Image (cartoon, grey):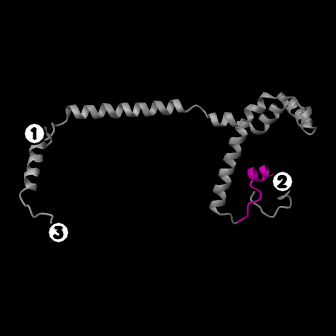
Amino acid sequence: MLVSDQPNCRTQSPLARLLLLTCLPRDQSRHTTDTMARRLTSVLRMTARRSSAVAKASEGELTALKEKEKLPWGQLTNSEKTQLYRAAYGKTRKEMQKGDGDGVSVMMGVGIGLATSFILFKLLQSRGQPAPKTMTAEWKQATKEKIVEGRNANPIHNKNF
């Protein structure tokens, strides 16, 4: 139902407008649809995160806490404040920064990748062709001697006239 001229379009809650898509114009673009899909996914993820905290407290307890929430906050206990916070936000800042614990699996993957690369390198090095004769120490020493002898061959080289 994509009708933009509904009379109650402005009175609906933002979540209802987002989920029902009642306030989109008739000539909506693909960009608008993609944006709405991303927002819907984000809202559903937030709802899923909160559901674990909300499931711990029953509906009766939450309604009672919502009524107490309207009173001065000094009258609430710390556990009630915590339950209200968990119902609204789900995780604390420390829990969000802690993450899901993917570091161990990432480090295992990196370690396995490095070990595999090292084994392949050593396998190719052991079964590959021998180094060319130009890479031997004797050849390198002879090359250095030729360079030194070549420097003395032309005494006028690199002189500015």
Does the magenta-highlighted stretch encompass residue 17?
yes
Quarter of the picture containing the C terminus is bottom left
Q: How far apart are marks 3 and 2 (CA)?
A: 87 Å
Q: Which amino acid does label 1 sit on?
A: Glu
Q: Which one is in front in this view, the residue at disc 1 or the one at disc 2?
A: 1
Q: How far apart are marks 1 and 3 (CA)?
A: 36 Å
Does the magenta-highlighted stretch encompass residue 131?
no
Quarter of the picture containing the N terminus is bottom right
Q: In this view, does 70 lie to the left or right of 140?
A: right
Asked if labels 2 and 1 touch by Cβ distance under 8 angstroms, the answer is no
Res. 50 image quadrant = top right
N-terminal label among 1 and 3:
1
Q: In percent of the image, x 34 and y 35: which residue is there?
A: 117
Query: Of 54 and 95, which appears nearest the observer?
Result: 95
The residue singled out by tag 3 in the image is: 160
Q: Which amino acid does label 3 sit on?
A: Asn
Crowding at label 3, few (<14), some or many (≥20) Cα neighbours within 10 Å? few
Res. 70 image quadrant = top right
Q: In percent of the image, x 76 and y 52: which residue is there?
A: 20
Bounds of the magenta span?
A: 13-26
